[in-house]
Each structure stands twice: as structure tokens, then as C-alpha cells.
Amino acid sequence: MTDATLENAPYSFVRKDTLPQEAPPLSVAGPLAWIRTNLFSSPLSSILTLIGIYLVIDTVPDMIRFYLIDAVWTGSNRDACLADKVGRPVGACWAYVADRVQYFIYGSYSVSERWRVNIVFAMFALGVVWLLWNRAPLKKVGVFFFFVILPASAFILLLGGDRAEGFLRFLILATFALAVVYLVLSFKPSLIKFWIGEGQLGVEEAMPPWQRFYRPKRLILIAMVVFGLLAVLDEKVGLPRVDTGLWGGVMVTLLISAVGIVFSLPLGVLLALGRRSRLPAIQLLSVIFIEFVRGVPLITVLFMANTMLPLFVPQEWSPDRLLRPLIGVAVFAAAYMAEVVRGGLQAIPKGQYEGAMSLGLGYWQMMRLIILPQALRIVIPGIVNTFIGLFKDTTLVAIVGIFDFLRTIEATLVDPTWATPTTRGTGYAFAAIFYFLCCWGMSRYSVAVEKRLAAGQKR
């Protein structure tokens, strides 16, 4: 039957126009379908959902009333947070937090020198953004800034005194010497072969001297600028010593967690490789270290670092009282990180090792270029989980007399100036918000990294 016959037929059974697409029924898509699938998919799920709804209805309004509606936001002493003084129900005493926030951030650090801590905070924020932002320019310079410039600058600024000034002079001289050495090498192409090899010598000879000096000069230049500014500050303003016993608050919490995170990952990678090594001595030492550290609580490690570590060195070389828990936390986290990395190494198929060896790669080249990138990508959740646990475990350093953020809050609770029935709950709520935001930020960033790295694995 032709199209003309169909068109002239008294009854037509063929539709030429496509019907518009209709929305899916509410039973398979939309809010009702999501609620039925995720909240009421089974009798047990329905019971748990109803219990959760009851708890939210029962607790959330009271929390909102206590921490927001009835809260006290301004005041100079405890009278502002006492119900009999203000004549109304009183909730959270946020005026206490506002009055003590400086102590929560800096501890007992000298008030006149807190600008030094602010500079370190600004440099830390810049380094974190530069390092973690995927589209940030000059990533290698950012890595150098975060792992070299920032620790050296933080030591000079936070500690101060003759020791920090001597270290600053050494850094300036070393940076200037490196600049002179490389500048000489950049104008002597015959000497560059010792640095880059014969294969690239012809290319380097064809470049003008300022282009041959271009790549390393970024690192040398940023070091000279930063250390030069520190020298100017020391000359104009002065950097008197602030004893580590006065440090506290958010500054110490971020310092301990940053040192632990930065050092635990490379140490954990080395320990994981050592545990999988075919050399019996290295494998045995790695196993003993990992199992011993993981077999004791962090409090024990902190006590050993604080009490036993000074016994192994001469009295004049005794580690600083803040350096001891830094070492203990880094060692403790490294042992757990080693097992996380080892799990990633075991998940790599044997063919990856064989393929790398077939290309003629040595052991360290194979690990650096082929194996470790894949292993670390697999265990990103485990690595971030260890980092989050380490960040929360920094509160345990109060056991050895270090005033971290939580310890500074507890110290202010005995202050009669703000002794009210709601002060304790307000202080701990403020601590909970701080730790939640930091841990939640690390968690969300790890999720973003997982999605970005998994994009190339989708088929």
C-alpha cells in the first residue's frame, strides 16, 4: 500500500507526527519516588525513618532556640548571660566566645607579636589554595612554596630570637649562593651537561643565557623575595623570641595537624614499600616499626616522645617541648598511613609491574611513574580518613601540657568572669563547629579529587 493510498483512505492508522514526550509517572520519578525508594523501601527502613523524623522534631527546635533565638550575642561579663540579670530565658552565651576568641586562636602568644602569626596564617592559606586548586598556575612553584618556603618562614616568624635570626641569615646566604652558582652555569653551556645530560646540551646552547636561567630562577627568586622580606621585618620591627610554652589555640592545632599530615604521607609510603621489600632486613624493620606503633595508643606515643625522647640526646640538644609531640604525632600517623598505602599497592595488578619492568624502568622509576600514582589514587578515601583522624587526635596533646584549641576553651571555662550555666555548652559547641568545618572541608575535597581522577577511568 502506497503513501497516496493511505492519505486517501477513509480511515488512517499511521501517525506521521511524533507525540510530545510526556513526563514520567510519579511512581518512578520525582520527589515521591525518591522518598519511597530511599526512606520507605522496607519495613525496617520505614521504622528508622520515622524514628529519625521524631528525633529531629524533638531536638532541632530546642537547639535552634538555645543557640540562636535565646542566645546572647553581646556583653562584657557573665551578667549578660544570666537569666535573672537580663530578665528573660538565656541560651548560648556567644558573647563569651567573642570576648575570648583571641585566646582561642593564639593562646598566650604575646599580643604585640600576633601579627607574625597572622602572616603565617596568610601564607598557609595561600599555600593550601595554590597546592589544592587544580587550575592554579605554576604548580611546581606552589609545591616549593608550601613544602620549603612556608615551613622555614613559619619557624622564623613564630619562634623569633637569635636562633631564628641565625637560621634566616643562613637561608639568605644559601639562596644567594645557589643563585650565583646557577647563573654561572647558565652562562657556561659546557658545564650544564653535568646537570641536564649530553642529550639536551645542544638545545640549551641555542638558548640565550636568560632563557637558560629561566626555569630554576622562579624558585630561587621566590626564596630571595620571601627571605628578604623577613630580613627587612627583622631589621625594622624586630622578631623577639616567643617561647613555645606560650603558643596555643588554633595556631597549635593547625601546626600539629599540618606537620603530621605533611610528614606522615611520605614516611608512610616508605614504610609501605619497606614492608613489601624483598630485602629481609628492611622488611623486618618496617614490620616491627609499623606493628609496634599501631599496637599502642597515641597517648602512649605522646608520653614516650615527651619523656623518653630527651633521654636519648644530650641535655643541650634536648628537643623543644612542642617539637616532641610533633614527632610523636607524625610517627604515629605514618604507621597507619603505611598500611593504607600498602593496601593500594596490593590492589595493583601484577601486569603493571611486569609492563614497567619490560620498559626497562628501575625500581624507583617504576614506583614513581607507574605504581604509586595508581595505588595512591585507589586509597584516596583511606588517606583522607587518616588525615581527618589525625586532625581530631591533635586534642590529645593536651595530655602532655600543650594548649591546643580545645584545651584553650577548657581553660577559659574556669574563668569567673564568664562562669554561667550556658558557658560550657557554648564553648564546646564552638569547638564542634570548628572541627566539623575543617573535617568536612577535607572530606569534600577528597570527593572532588576522586571524581576528577576517576573521570579518565570511565568507559
Image (cartoon, rainbow, N blue to C red):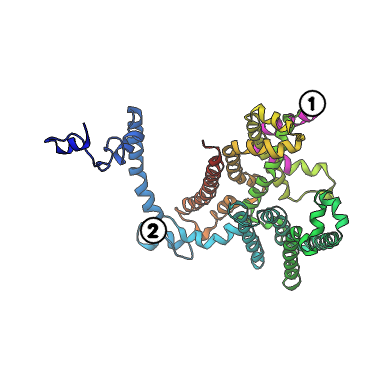
Figure quadrant of residue 307: top right
Frontmost residue, 346 versus 83: 346
Frontmost residue, 176 versus 85: 176
> Looking at the image, is 59 positioned above or below residue 154?
above
> Looking at the image, is 242 positioned above or below residue 287?
below
Return the x and y of residue 246 as percentages of the image width and height. Answer: 67, 58
The tally of labels here is: 2
Residue furthest out toward the left: 10
Task: Identify the element where label 1 is drawn.
Answer: helix
Figure quadrant of residue 55: top left
Magenta highlight on residue 287: yes
Task: Identify the element where label 2 is drawn.
Answer: helix
Residue 249 shows in the view? no
Q: Which residues are magenta?
A: 280-305
Magenta highlight on residue 141: no
Query: Horizontal placement of 252 versus 13: left or right?
Result: right
- Which label belongs to residue 83? 2
The answer to whether the residue labelled 1 contacts the one labelled 2, judged by CB atoms less than 8 Å apart, is: no
Q: Gap between marks 1 and 2, in whole Å?
A: 70 Å
Q: Main secondary structure of the magenta part?
A: helix
